[in-house]
Amino acid sequence: MEKNALSRSAALKAIGTGLAATAVPRIASAQAATPVRIAGVFSDLFAEPFFAKDAGAFAKAGLDVQPISQYNAGAVAAAIGGGSLEMGTGDLVSGVNAINAGLPILLIAGGGLYREPADSGTAILAVAVDSPLHGPKDLAGKTIGVPTLVGMTTACTKSWLTLHGIPESAVRFVELPPTLAIPALQRGTVDAALISEPFVTFGKGLVRSVGAPYDAAADLAKGKQFCVSVWYASQAWMEADPARARRAVNAIYDTARWANTHHDETFDILVRDGKLDPVKAAGMQRTLYATSMTPDIIQPVLDIAAQNKMFTKPVDARTLIART
């Protein structure tokens, strides 16, 4: 196990070299490009892969990205480990468990950020608008839908409930894709569900918030912000060509800078790739994407996951990311 950890550390140090990057043009120059399969989960927090081609950063780096939508963050990690993807965005809990289980994947970059209180309305525990539930104490004995049962969303929700006096044993969690959460709430299939943008905006008039579970992690974080999503990559793909790996990480952060300043363009991409109704999606609050990755924006999620027994042992963020 220590040998594998050293291999990951060496690879990450090589990857992390030279991450400083400049702004990229929207249209990159034509060049022969290496196909790269990348994936995300269709939520603004995990949507960077869908912006990558339009941003032009990967094309500039000689990489032809082919974005794919996956069911949840665990599916992204499994696909990278299985060799059907080179890179993708996922959450820390699913990805770190995959790494600990021996899947050959690396944590390479930060993704979508959650900032308290600025983003407290973008990721909510929602109930139907006519639900009798109004706060965390009303959730005892209820069923809650979450995107993945062993992941950051569930870890934060469990900790948030505990902080409000509701033990994990008092609720039932079920896996529920974000696209199905609002219909499930309306039908009464679940009593509450964790949803984030663009689904928070879609649900206006149909659902309402009873709390912001991500605040449980933000309260542990320096500056009250942390990474909800992060980027993983195939260890074999990254180690096969360190120069290409550095270009890929640079392209991720260039894409983040572009997305942070081109909300009109990224909105159009979400509408296009997600086949969304642009009228219903209008006005959604947008995600700020990380342009670097440091232990302080990762450790809070790792700590909450350990508290909720989602890891076999505590995890130190410094062992997962490169020091540049």
Image (cartoon, rainbow, N blue to C red):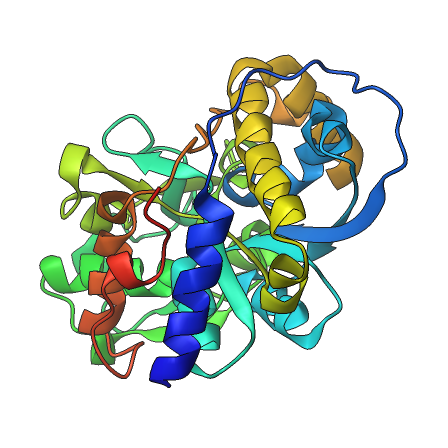
Displayed quadrant of residue 310: bottom left
Left or right placement of residue 204 versus residue 115 in this view: right
Please tell me which residue lies in front, 241 or 172. 241
Displayed quadrant of residue 50: top right
Please tell me which residue lies in front, 63 or 97. 63
Does the image show residue 243?
yes
Residue at 54 percent of width and 61 percent of height: 73
Q: Which quadrant holds the N terminus?
A: bottom left
Please tell me which residue lies in front, 82 or 203. 82
In percent of width and height, residue 30 lies at: 89, 24
Number of numbered labels in the structure image = 0
Task: Look at the picture and state if 40 lies above or below 150.
Answer: above
Displayed quadrant of residue 227: top left
In percent of width and height, residue 224 lies at: 19, 36
Task: Look at the picture and state if 61 lies above or below 164.
Answer: above
Residue at 36 percent of width and 54 percent of height: 321
Left or right placement of residue 224 versus residue 252 in this view: left
In percent of width and height, residue 163 lies at: 11, 58
Task: Look at the picture and state if 190 lies above or below 24.
Answer: below
Q: Which quadrant holds the C terminus?
A: top left
Residue at 24 percent of width and 33 percent of height: 116
Residue at 58 percent of width and 66 percent of height: 235
Does the image show residue 173?
no
In percent of width and height, residue 110 lies at: 43, 43
